[in-house]
Amino acid sequence: MYKRYYDIDVDAKAYANRIVKAGGRIPSDILSVSDFIKKLKINNLWIDILDVWLMRKDHNIGTGTTVYALKNDRYNATMSSASMVWDNTGIIKNVSTQYLSVPLVSTGGRVNRSIIGVSKKASANHEVISYGTISAVRFALRVDVAVDKVRLDAYNGSINDSFGSTNITANFNQLAASYDTNTLLFKANNLTATTSNISMSFAPSSLIFFGGWDPTQISLGLSTTSFGLISDRAFSSAQIDTFYSIMKNTIGKGLDLP
């Protein structure tokens, strides 16, 4: 199974070794993980990614409540419940209040940020990935089933900028948001970007949630999350398209992405 292990990217090997050290096995599809990293490096995207969370069973430890971050154990995610399910397509929430959380993520004080998430359209509204501080500045990528849209909600104190797109499929979708100076960019899959003028000032360290921002107050809905990413740089629309193509043909194979 691992006859090509000698050819695996050094960062993919380090990721697999961390999982083995924690008591797991080498992810069974480590080759796709390696190809994903290699192509990001070729396209000069790897260095700008703070961390990545691979949630498909064959790309991570596949058991337990810890979701190992691709680059650094510091940013490992934790399931809110042991009843959440590792699946070949991602982590399944089987109760609406379940979520994954990541410890405070420091981006060195830079205000430019990008977040990307891949999730399956569910029967109820749900957040895919959200980032920021609870009481002040944050943005969230979400699926609004009632109006059949994917949305970006941006909060900056009293400012709430919300806009969306009808370009979603019945299966898995990639949602991406990027903030550069006073421009907030939003894309669904590889489709035309939507932009909005908004001034945001992120805290040096912020929280990341997959599934919902405030699980004690929001009905999050059932969903399957396959992937998440945060960058401390603002990705352009073209870079997001490049990332989508790389993801779809490596770690996203088999998800029926559009």
Image: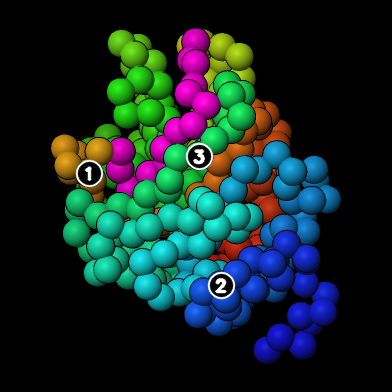
Q: Earlier in the sequence, mark 1 or mark 2?
A: 2
Could you tell me which quadrant the N terminus lies in?
A: bottom right
Residue tagged by mark 2?
19
State whether residue 187 is above or below residue 22: above
Q: Residues within 10 Å of mark 2 (few under 14, many from 20)?
A: many
Give the residue type that dot 1 points to.
Pro
Residue displayed at 74% across by 43% down: 47
Q: In this view of the protein, can residue 9 be seen by the observer?
A: yes
Give the residue type that dot 3 points to.
Val
Horizontal and vertical percent for residue 43?
Answer: 80, 45
Q: Main secondary structure of the magenta part?
A: loop
Q: Which residues are magenta?
A: 199-213
Work out how far the residue at label 3 is from the one at label 1, CA to CA, in angstroms: 19 Å
Circle 3 or circle 1, nearest the eye: 3
Horizontal and vertical percent for residue 5?
Answer: 76, 80
Nearer-the-camera pick, 66 or 21: 21
Q: Quadrant of residue 150?
A: top left
Q: Residues within 10 Å of mark 1 (few under 14, many from 20)?
A: some
Circle 1 or circle 2, nearest the eye: 2
Q: Quadrant of residue 63?
A: bottom left
For the residues labelled 2 and 3, say whether their Cβ atoms are less than 8 Å apart: no
Nearer-the-camera pick, 85 or 151: 85
Q: Residues within 10 Å of mark 3 (few under 14, many from 20)?
A: some
Q: In this view of the protein, can residue 129 be seen by the observer?
A: no
Residue tagged by mark 3?
105
Give the residue type that dot 2 points to.
Ile
Horizontal and vertical percent for residue 72?
Answer: 60, 55
Magenta-drawn stretch contains 170: no
